[in-house]
Amino acid sequence: MMHPSRKAFVEDHPMDEDRGGLTLDQVPNDYNYDLGTGENASALLSQFERKRMAARLAVPTNDEAIKAMLRERGLPITLFGENNPADRRERLRETLADEAERAKAQGQDAVDVEMDDAAEEEDDEEQEEEYYTRGNDELLQSRVEIAKYSLLRAKRRVQFQRQEAKIPLRTHVKHRKQIREQLQDFELQSSQVGGQRYLSVPGGPKVNKIGFHPSGRYLATACEDTTWKLYDIATGSELLSQEGHSRAVMTVSFQSEGALVATAGMDSIGRVWDLRSGRTIMLCEGHIQPITSSSWIDGHRILSASLDGFVKVWDVRKVAQGGNLAGNTSGVTDVRVFRGPDDPVEGEAPGQDEKGAQIPKKSATFFATCGFDRKINVYSMDDYSLISSLESHTAPVSSVDISRDGRWIVSGSHDRTIKLWARNEMEPL
């Protein structure tokens, strides 16, 4: 039973009318009232209407067209605090909205020819289709020479693979274990300041990367203007200017046999091209950030490094992704596969031991990456496991490479230093 002190107090006597109270029935109803609209509410509604009208305006998406329209109206191209073209486009939208309001107030039709031009420009962009440009005789001759060159190197690769297939698994495991132990002993041996300031960038289209064809007769460049170009070194003439990427191309790398070339860039997509036909044979889609570097493992596998922090393996034969590696804790800026002197395509294939058995090759048994986490990581090509992590740079590492004999690993960083890494014995692998 509840104690009386915990019970709620409820008045049970009727309301005393002498105390001035009113019942609901006594409240008067007024149906003849008018709610006035203040100036603030009117201005707010007008602002909403203006925003809706501005959103319906067709504003060019091309930054050069936006600058031209601002210049025609006598307005500055860039204001303090505008960080990107999107801010400039919004300012032009506000300007066009003001012009439309003034035209409406004067009783004129708010028709802007430039807006129609912008709409037509956007329609043209949507209607872009793939097209082919007829090549010249010089390009045709170079493709024939590349085809002949690649066939001979492919023949050498197949011959070695037949011999390599006879090597027992135990021999492979012992060989790879020995290489792994040697790589774990790499330490910093030298550091040199490369310069007191960054190199200046000349005017004109920017070249982000260059690569030599294995034959030494051709040179490829990855350009900022969304193209990659192929040059004849002997004559200096441009053989090919290939489109295909929607943004700047950051990397270009040739297959060791010379028949294929891989390109990738700021659009986060990699492309594998057949130099003999000029066609794309594979799209490498999987990265969510720009691709900064690529390196061929062998004749059909490629490594790609991206600012999303991943290194991906692509198989051209399967036309699919073959692996995914969280290379660094932040963006990866470069990746490099070790190319030894015993490479069956680019060097001299290893011979036989005293028992007549085929000796395994050291080439393409490991690779190195670097990135914004200031580390150089060395990975095994067998299972993509981390072998060693080299740390000494004080700023993001932008590039890495491995010497032909495997003795040195060199790295370049934003701290303006070049560092050499090796074993204390200073001996090749």
Image (tube, rainbow, N blue to C red):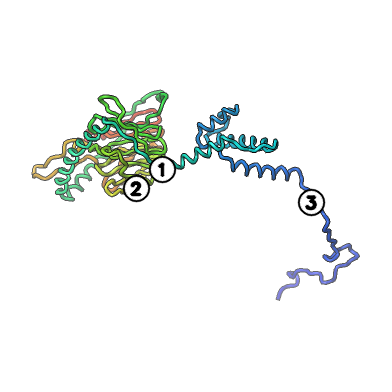
Q: Residue at x 11, y 42 (%)?
A: 353
Lower sequence index among marks 3 and 2:
3
**Residue count near mark 3 (Cα–Cα under 10 Å), binned few <14, some 14–19, many ≥20:** few
**Horizontal and vertical percent for residue 287?**
39, 44
Quarter assignment of residue 56? top right
Q: In the image, what residue type sits under mark 2?
A: Asn
Which residue matches tag 2?
324
User: Which residue lies under the disc numbered 1?
Assistant: 308
Q: Position of residue 152 (x, y in %)?
A: 17, 38
Q: Which mark is residue 35?
A: 3
Mark 3 and mark 1 in contact? Answer it, CB < 8 Å.
no
Camera-nearest residue between 218 and 56? 56
The percent coordinates of residue 396 (x first, y second) are 40, 34
From this view, report whether residue 404 is shown above or below residue 286. above
From this view, report whether residue 190 is shown above or below residue 275: above
Q: Nearer the viewer, mark 3 or mark 2?
A: 3
Q: How crowded is the residue under tag 2: few (<14 C-alpha within 10 Å), some, or many (20+)?
A: some
> In terms of secondary structure, where does tag 3 sit?
loop
Residue 30 coordinates in the image, percent (x, y):
84, 58
User: Is there any visible trace of residue 388 in the rendered image?
Assistant: no
The reply, left or right, for residue 33 in relation to residue 316 is: right
Three-letter amino acid code at the position of disc 3? Leu
| Callout 1: SS | loop
Horizontally, residue 285 falls left or right of residue 72, namely left
99 or 322: which is nearer to us? 99
Quadrant, the C terminus: top left
